[in-house]
Amino acid sequence: MTKLVSLGMKRKSLRRRLIAPRHCCLYDPNLCAATINFVSEIFDSTLRKGELVLVDFSQLQEMTAGAALFTFGNISAVQILTKSLHSIEMVLPKDHDARRMMIGTGLWRALKTGPAVSSLWDSPSEYLSGSNPAGDYKRTLNRLENTQGGLPESVSRAINEAILNVSHHAYEFLGEEDPLTASLGKRWWQNHIWTEDGLSFLIYDRGMSIPRTIQHKAFGASPVNLLKMAMTAGVSRLKDNVGRGIGSEDIKRPVHEQVASLILISGGARFEMSKANQIEGFSAMPRPFPGTLIEWHHKLSPFTANLAEPI
């Protein structure tokens, strides 16, 4: 929902008010499309239409982890590309729990950080952004281990593979088609949440989706079938598969080896895998998703003895 509002006293500037849904969620098919529309409109209004926006969270009652990272990634991308905080102003939720979530988790601070998003690495923030695959992977691993102990090797390898996928594929072919987004380079956004139930780790990039990077292998195939192909052992996004294609197995391995679950949303398709619930399947997204979001949830003890070595 959008409308124009005027801000300021002597010189009024028009801002497009973008009102967040009451429930921002990427998991529920009934809520997913509205969430993607809302967040995508922030990016498109500012960068493609050149508008100033007021992002109004006042009606927000609930925001799931994936939706929070998706929101952070897109607002941060605008701030990085415009080199300014000016394009976007924001209003906190009125709901007490939603307001406490946004401030208490560090999301509000991350949203207000602006182009200096790398400074979040020097803070306790769980919301982070990286562009240096090797260095930021090690910093991620150190942060997780220093916070709660250690990680199984399968978890560290999955995180590393997700970061490498951003570096190698996400923005690689966007130059001519979408030079604005391509200028983000190798940028991704991440979040981790430790609870008594274990660890959730999420990573998001706004690059070319997995189905689109592999569509040269099956012209005309649906996003769901393309994602199935990409998640098959031995299949690479590159035309030459030799020596490649193990990445999808690394991403799924924590579910095979731990009590874990995985949700991967990319373009027009979604993959879900859960060992506890014996779920493994693909489905179409109700609306195309800009980029790729991966979320693992691992039922780990907060202090795990099996420390992972940097890869």
Image (cartoon, rainbow, N blue to C red):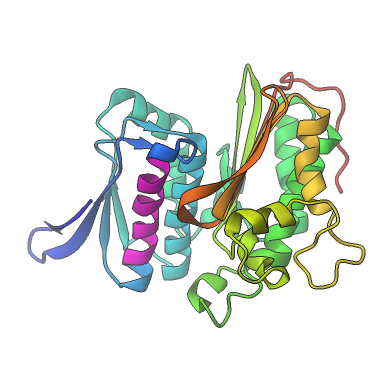
**Residue 126 rendering spot, x and y as whole percentages:** 57, 38
Q: Quick one: which residue is furthest to the right in this view?
A: 243
**Residue 275 rendering spot, x and y as whole percentages:** 73, 26
Q: Residue at x 7, y 64 (%)?
A: 10
Is 38 located above or below residue 49 in the figure?
above
Task: Let me know if residue 203 is in the magenta part.
Answer: no
- Overall secondary structure of the magenta section: helix
Which residues are drawn in magenta? 31-45
- In the image, is 52 to the left or to the right of 212? left
Q: Is residue 264 visible?
A: no
**Residue 4 rendering spot, x and y as whole percentages:** 15, 59
Task: Let me know if residue 44 is in the magenta part.
Answer: yes
Q: Residue at x 44, y 29 (%)?
A: 104
- In the image, is 14 to the left or to the right of 21? left
- In the image, is 79 to the left or to the right of 205? left
Q: Quick one: which residue is furthest to the left in this view?
A: 10
Q: Quick one: which residue is furthest to the front in this view?
A: 220
**Residue 256 rendering spot, x and y as whole percentages:** 81, 32
- In the image, is 16 to the left or to the right of 229? left
Q: Residue at x 83, y 51 (%)?
A: 233
User: In this view of the protein, which residue sits in the foreground, 233 or 51?
Assistant: 233
Picture quadrant of residue 209 = bottom right
